[in-house]
Image (cartoon, rainbow, N blue to C red):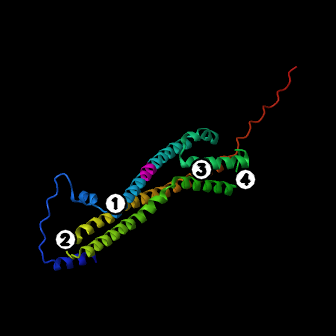
Amino acid sequence: MVASFLFALLLQDDVPLAPAAPAPANSSPLMEMIHNSGPTAFTVLVLLLLFSIFSWAIMFQKWNQFRTARAKNAAFLRAFRKSSRLGEVAAIAEQYRPAPLVSVFIEIADEYQRQSGGRGMPRNSHAMERAALTASSESLSVMEKRLTWLATIAAVAPFIGLLGTVLGIIDAFHGLGTAGAATLRAVAPGISEALITTAAGLVVAIPAVIGYNQFTAQLREFGGRMDDFARELLNAIENAGATPAAPAAPPPPPTRAQF
């Protein structure tokens, strides 16, 4: 619609457009338009800049958090598979925080301790499974904090930029009507400045969308790893409890008294 209107203005303009003055060598047209933006467009650009800084801060924080959790998970899993006793793993588990697998292990170990005192077969394996699900859900809830902000920024930023563009075009048309000159030379600068806000909204939204999708996929991966580890731990506990104890050695036969 805007393009059709500008084309019509170009056809109606009887006066040939004068060549634009060359821009200074140390400035770009984009920076010049941003510098000359009106108060509405400038406010929208500042708001989008704040959203961009906030979204990038969340993405860097989540990248560091997930990288640390992945490394701690791998180290704890190696220690768990090398150990043959549940108590040994429980003694060193805290040093692998904030690995999500540690939370699953502690919840299952505590439930096993309550049921059988840490020995023998557990009385209720379903309760241990529920404890593992609870620990997994709590860990994922901690890891996904502030990710909804990325989704919100990704959804809202293009509309904020579009709002700035619409308001800028309204201002340009209002100025055009006040000046009384329906020419492309009169309306083009205002429209070009207004379109910057739409581009800025897309620049803010695209990284937020990519970051949200990537972190959501990693959360699903963490959830799958916690489920696999819970099953592995439950199997280890049941196998250890079902292993029969070695029979005691028979007492030596009595010796005949010698006279």
Residue depicted at x 37% and y 68%: 163
The segment highlighted magenta reads 57-63
Please name the amino acid that badge 4 sits on: Arg
Residue 187: x %, y % from top left = 24, 71
Nearest to the observer: residue 13 or residue 236: 13
Is residue 242 visible in the rendered image? The answer is no
Secondary structure under tag 1 reads helix
Query: Which residue carries the number 4 mark?
Result: 123
Q: Are marks 2 and 1 in contact (CB under 8 Å)?
A: no
Query: Which residue carries the number 2 mark?
Result: 185
Is residue 180 visible in the rendered image? The answer is yes
Is 40 part of what is drawn in magenta? no
Secondary structure under tag 3 reads helix
Measured Cα–Cα span from mark 3 to mark 4: 19 Å
Q: Earlier in the sequence, mark 2 or mark 4?
A: 4
- Which dot marks residue 28? none
Query: Which residue carries the number 3 mark?
Result: 104
Discs 2/4, front = 2
Relative to 42, is 78 on the left or the right? right
Give the main secondary structure, helix, strand or loop, of the magenta stretch: helix
Residue depicted at x 35% and y 69%: 167
Q: Earlier in the sequence, mark 2 or mark 3?
A: 3
Please name the amino acid that badge 2 sits on: Arg
